[in-house]
Image: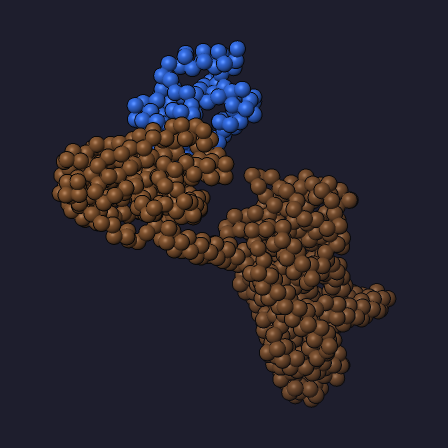
Chain colours: A blue, B brown
Amino acid sequence: MKENEITIITSKDDDISILQIIGFLDAHTASSLENAIEKLINEDNFKIICDCTELEYISSAGFGVFMEFIEELRANGGDLKFTGLNPKLKNLFELLGFNVLFEIEDDIKKLKSDFTKKAK
Amino acid sequence: MKNFDGISNILKWSKKQLLILAIVFLSLRIIGDFILSAFFGYAEYEENLIWKFTTTFLIITASAAYFSNLLTHDLKEYKENFAKKFSEDLYSLLLLYIIGFAISLPNFNYPEIFKNASLPYYVFFQIIGWYLLVISFFTINFLFKWLLARKTKNTSTTVKFFKIVLAFILFHIFISNGTEYIFGWKVLSDTTNIISQVLFWASGIVLFFMPLNTNWLKFVNSKEKKKIFWYALVLVVFSYFITSQVGSSKSGIYFATNQIFPKMNLLVFYPTLLFTIYSFRIFIISRSKRWNLANERRDLEILTLSNFNRYILEANTTNRQQLHKIFMDGILSIVPADFDWIEEYTNGKFEISYFHNTNNKAIENFHSIPQFENFIKDINSPELINNIQEEMHLDDRVLHGSLAIIPLYEQRNRIGSIILCRYENYAFDFEELQFLRTFADNMAVAIANSLLLEEAIEKRRYQMELMYAQNIQKKIIPAKFPEIENYSIAGISIPANELGGDYFDLVYLKGGVPTILIGDVSGKGVSSALYLAELKGIVLSIAPSVATAKELLIKLNEILYPNIEKQIFITLSAISLNDNAGNIEYIRAGHTPLAIKQNGTTQYIAPKGLALGLASPIIFNNNLASYRTELHLNDICLLYSDGLSELWNPENIEFGEERISDLLNNNHIAKAQDLIAVAINEIDNFKSNNKLRDDLTIVSIIFLGKNNERK
């Protein structure tokens, strides 16, 4: 994977959307993720899990994308949750305090069930 | 010369071959005459008619084919360089006429000369007649060329008319007169004589009024104009002389031409008399007010062009619509049209961006004609369609008139066309086309210029703005830290691009507690730099009112959280130097950990803390912890931005915390500034020729005091 490249794969599991973010998430590629999330919101999908298993790098601009949408998602009964973070990324999330703001969980099933629980 | 066109097509010979053929026929004729007179003595000009008819017919046919060939050959060049070629042709004719005049003078008193000429040499006098015929042919050729070069709506009719007149005169000479001499039929020759005279005078009238109709001489400069004036004047005199001589039965050249064939003098008389009328007309025109009007039109064109260029330079050229309006204003002021439109091409489709006196449906109608489509695509400079129906091979009676099409280019790409239409056929003249071509060149230059100019202005403006911003940013980051007892402090910030989003500073909190700050605004470029400036302002305004670094961060988040864009956040770390004895308090809002070397080992401290602007005060405050420690002699605190820890070398390996630890552990440095120098050196070696991915900031704090002494 080259620098400045990103691939985002969107899939659906019930009412939960899973965004697979592959590659580099920085100022140059942030708009791709923005578009992907915007598209989900426009289609009334507010429950999003970001699968970061193949995310190699995230810059501050990348984090900014999550902040841009979180309020809107939560206001509509949804949320943004993260899974598949490698230790380095997890450390980065924690340093910024994103672990306080977002649910981060290695077990994607738990994230899904958390969504369902919340709905009840 | 319809009949001659046919012959030249059959022959398909080159000009040179045709000329040789004519000369061979002429030689045959003269030698024949010579032999005939040697055997049979002096012949009256009405004798030997069959011989004369045959030879003359052959000679005239060959030379007519030659001239017809010459005409098609010259016409293209003549059209393109009309003003210059016109005076050149007049000059050539002038020479021909002067020589004709010179050789006519000695036999002015025909009877004496001819009577004194001994047999059989008198036949050579017909050479003078042949020479006059050559003059006549060149004159006819010139007049046809002039007519065809200025293609107007009347040209084709006029050319047809002149061909008929010429054919009729030839008929009159050869058939009517021939039969009269042979069979004595006077009625036919009298009738054709009257008709040819009427036709001749009609041609004379046409030729007299034709130059009046257009400003066809207006592109001629004053030097050429002067030439034309004098040539025309001299031509009037000499052509009139020849006309009068060849028409008078008492002159030598009258006899010389009729020696060729009876009444052959008419073939010289009519064209030269027409040419006298024409030359007189040109002479008058070259002195008339008409010429001044033409000059005015040219002045208007120049004014239009210069205005146009000025508008282009002043206009905001990214606005295509505005550009087109300027184009149309300029074009229509010189070349008015009954209706016109501009079309633009994108991805093989055309789009109409402007139209006047027409509508989309009519334009689409034009585009449904394949010939029109092809014509428009193929041209690379303005061209005319003089007769839509004829040139597009249309049966459709709805579309008629003429078009002028001006292709539009942006750099080398064809981006569109301007189409001007008039309801009449042949409504655009050659001069208008010339203007459109000049204008089109200017349009292309103007477009290219304005694009370059725009780029240059944009670049310059950007550079200026950047320079201002860089100057401001330099003031945000301190050039030097103030002296603080027992501490050596230094920092550096290297932006990855022109403007950085990193920050460090030293502020004094309430009670004068020196506090070192390092921060990083998320994102890159100008927006980060602006937030940075804002951050610095807020920090400076609230620092004196807060007692601790924790309180400072809480206040900052309170202000920033509701006020900055959602996707922007700021990481910030602060170290308060609580005393001179090494007691420090470290607090972190999302920033990279503190590297601290104590007792020779380096560790990373990252107490809880969210980045500023991410979370509401409740969440932020509940997740903020400070870290206190006591420094000893030569202990080092190294604050840095992620630009350092995430720095990449060409093999895509991160600088990482280990190298930072090594940097601190392997160097025993007592001055913060030296540590920075060592670090930069290390960084340069590591990154090699890789560019910085992110702004890189380092602040080093070295404790130089002896805390034991104080206890």
Residue B159 pos. (x, y %): 72, 61
Place of residue B588 in the rendered image (x, y in percent of width and height, measured from the top left): 33, 35
Query: Residue at 40% of width from left, 27% of height from top?
Result: B622
State the image coordinates of residue B51 (x, y, percent, origin top left).
Answer: 67, 66
Quarter location, residue B107:
bottom right
Q: For this rendering, which residue is in front, B299 or B667?
A: B667
**B456 relative position to B260: left or right:** left
What is the count of numbered marks? 0
**Can I make out residue B387 in this image?**
no
- In depth, the one of B419 and B287 nearer the eye is B419
Identify the residue at image location x=73%, y=70%.
Answer: B211
Q: Give the vertical position of A38 relative to B649 (above or below).
A: above
Residue at position x 31%, y 22% in the image? A86
Position of the C terminus of chain B by quadrant: top left
Which sits in the foreground, B380 or B708?
A: B708
Q: Is residue B22 above or below residue B503?
A: below
Residue at x 77%, y 44% (from the top left corner) = B398
Specify the quadrant of the image occupied by residue B504.
Answer: top left
Q: Is residue B561 visible?
A: yes
Residue B253 is left or right of residue A116, and the answer is right
